[in-house]
Amino acid sequence: MSGRTLWTGFLVALAGLALLPFGVGGYVLGLMTLAYYYGVFAMAWDLLFGFAGEVNFGPSFLTGLGAYAAGLLNHYAGWPIPACVAAGAAAAVVGGVALAVPALRLSGPYFGLITLVAVLLLQNALVLNAGFTGGEIGLDLPDVLSADESTNYWIALAFMGLSGAILFGLSRSAVGLILQASGQDAVEASALGYNVTKHKLAAFCISALFSGLAGAMLVFYLGTASVGTVVDIAVGVQVIIAAVLGGRRTILGAAIGAIFLIVAGELLRPLGQLSTFVVSAFALAVILFFPGGFLGILSSRGGAR
Amino acid sequence: MSALLEVSGLTKRFGGLVAVKDIGFSIAAGEILGLIGPNGSGKSTVMKLIMGIERPNAGSVRIDGVDVAGWPTHRIARQGVGLVFQHSRPLHRQTVLENITLALLPDSLFRLAAGSHVAARAREIAARVGLEGVMHRRPSTLPFADLRRLELAKAVARNPKVVLVDEPFAGLTAGEVASFSELIASFRAEGHAVLLVDHNVKSVAALVDRVLAMYLGEYVAEGSAEEVMRNETVRRVYLGGKIELAARPEPTDTGRPPLLDVAGASVLYGKAQALEDVSLHVREGEFVSVVGLNGAGKTTLFNAISGLVPHAGEIRFAGESLRGRSAAQIARGGIVQCPESRELFGGMSVQDNLELGGQHQPAPVRERQLAWLYELFPILKARARQASRTLSGGEQQMLAIARALMMQPRLLILDEPTLGLAPVILEQLSKAMELLRQTTDITVLLGEQNVTFALPHADRVYVLEHARIVWEGTPTRFEAEMGTGYL
């Protein structure tokens, strides 16, 4: 699929989704709002995995940092929402860099393992200091983005649209090309004169920035910051499955995957415990038989450009 | 003219192994130097040290006067060194043109769009290397030679002062070799310094101005291609010393089909032709040698016989076709291959390794085999309780052969047993082979680069070159007909 086709499809889809509040009720809107934030998590993750070739097993470390930095500042210091969100994004980038600089020195599976351990550390730190952070029950926030469901929905959609445009544009740019080369064959990329570590670190920062932003926005939508929604390992696993399901190296596919996972989970809720099983089995089947994910299937149908 | 690349005292150790020892040379602008040596000679390591992929332990690498030894790879590349990799890994989702564009971009995080001059330059380069017809295709749809062109294009794009080319002609047909030679010669015409790394002098002789030969990490000879080919030490490294022959006439009276009969075997690795229409046969009790330089296709041939790689053509063993049989079935059928990598169990003792080889046999037979092998290789008996990883290279090779013999093969395939062995060890191994041939009626198919080792035991010889059999005959005729042209 060419870049132009994808851009057109992306804009048409956004325009269509923007009309949703005129046709459906608050319940569906709430669900989609949540899905859009997860979509940004997944797109940010795909930039790192699909392009830089680094598997971040702890995407919720970054979202959690953003969410809790923003939440705590709002709860204790009473900062306004925009300042809290900006601080959350900054916290994710700083925390992410502190983690990535030593981790990127290691080759092989160690980067992934370090990110995995980081999530556990963050989760435990939050739970152990429950008196300060609200622990597993959650931290109540005095401010929320909006009380109106439609407004919340449009904010989330606009945020996802903007993030998607920036991340997708980046992935198709000259920098994206270098990043992809670095991820695929670091020796050859450096023999072509590219500082592979620099490019991977930049990708990690960008990934952290959007994860932190999305995490911070999410808690102001929910009105509460809790370990279960933004930090837990299971959240990270959902993000990874969403990105792979939607299509590795496509950025936009990751958002589609996230929306699919959340909507499918809800549609199958009558199945009870079984719903998670069904969704997971479906995801497994897609990954096994169509490793290109949803967008991969579409582009192979459409043929090479 | 001053040298663009000047290497001196370059040394690299991997643990206790000295892979490169005090190597020095220089290449002027507009000059091509061939760096040659058999497998394990350290020539590829020299290339990696220049590019900064490995860090040298000692020595200097000067690019146009600047010492870059120990710098990270990307800085060395920016200083003006380009490497044409042997195995290309292009970006598969991007077109050929985008892959070339990649090599033209600045190392910047903030230049999101490449300028229009970059696109124009990429097209120009594609045309120069002969990719103009496939610019908009994905690399995965290209034939092998075009993938190599793409690697060359990336080197052209960087416009480096020094171009390193790793095995420029591996896997290419004669016609493709000619057009690649022209492209590499054009680097010289433009005033680049070019280093070609290859196994043998012959393939690069027409192109290079000078040749430097290495063996076991050390300098052997330097000079024109002809001088190096005539050099005594080089000839000994590749061909060995004086050859004594002991061929037996081929038994033709039997009327039975040969034990092994290969007819028209071909193997493709991806898009590279590794074996092309090869036919040969081995009769019961014969010792047949296949000689050829590294990369000629010997291992591929043996792997095809052992059922390890898919192949076209027909391979028959003891009158029956091997098609459709698994590698395990073929091995149980009596074809035992002793691979060049030896594949010993390093932590196990010599005796354990041997007993494992005879695992499927009844205990009395196993013990008889073991006793016989200890007689054949007395050194193994002395080392029976030692862990096999503590053996020397030559002893390990003897153990690998002995383990293969434990399986009582009807056909023993030996793949380059002399690989990386010092000359004195070769003699011991050679004596054991002679004893084996004289005291048993074993059937052997031997693959060798070292002619001195391959010829004395052989009844018949095949020469494999660029995936094809180019000569067959007796060892006596080999000396007369091929002796000078082999290198």
Image (spheres, grey):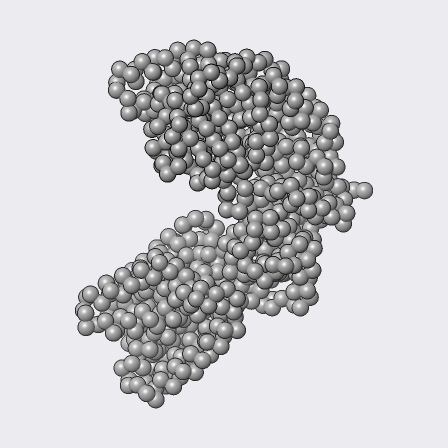
The image quarter containing residue B308 is top left
Where residue A168 appears, as percent x and y from the top left, is 49, 70
Q: Is residue A134 in sight in this rendering?
A: no
Above or below residue B99? Residue B287 is: above
The x and y percentages for residue B376 are: 41, 13
The residue located at (37%, 38%) in the rendering is B324
Q: Is residue A25 visible?
A: yes
Numbered label tally: 0
Residue shown at 48% from the left, 58% from the top: A52
Quarter assignment of residue A152: bottom left
Nearer to the camera, B257 or B260: B257
* Residue depicted at x 54% and y 42%: B273
Seen from the viewer's position, the closer of residues B353 and B389 is B353
Q: Residue B97: give x, y in percent of width and height.
A: 61, 61
Left or right: B68 in relation to A140: right
Q: Residue at x 34, y 86 (%)?
A: A21
Expressed as whole percent of the image width and height from the top left, the position of residue A165 reads 48, 74
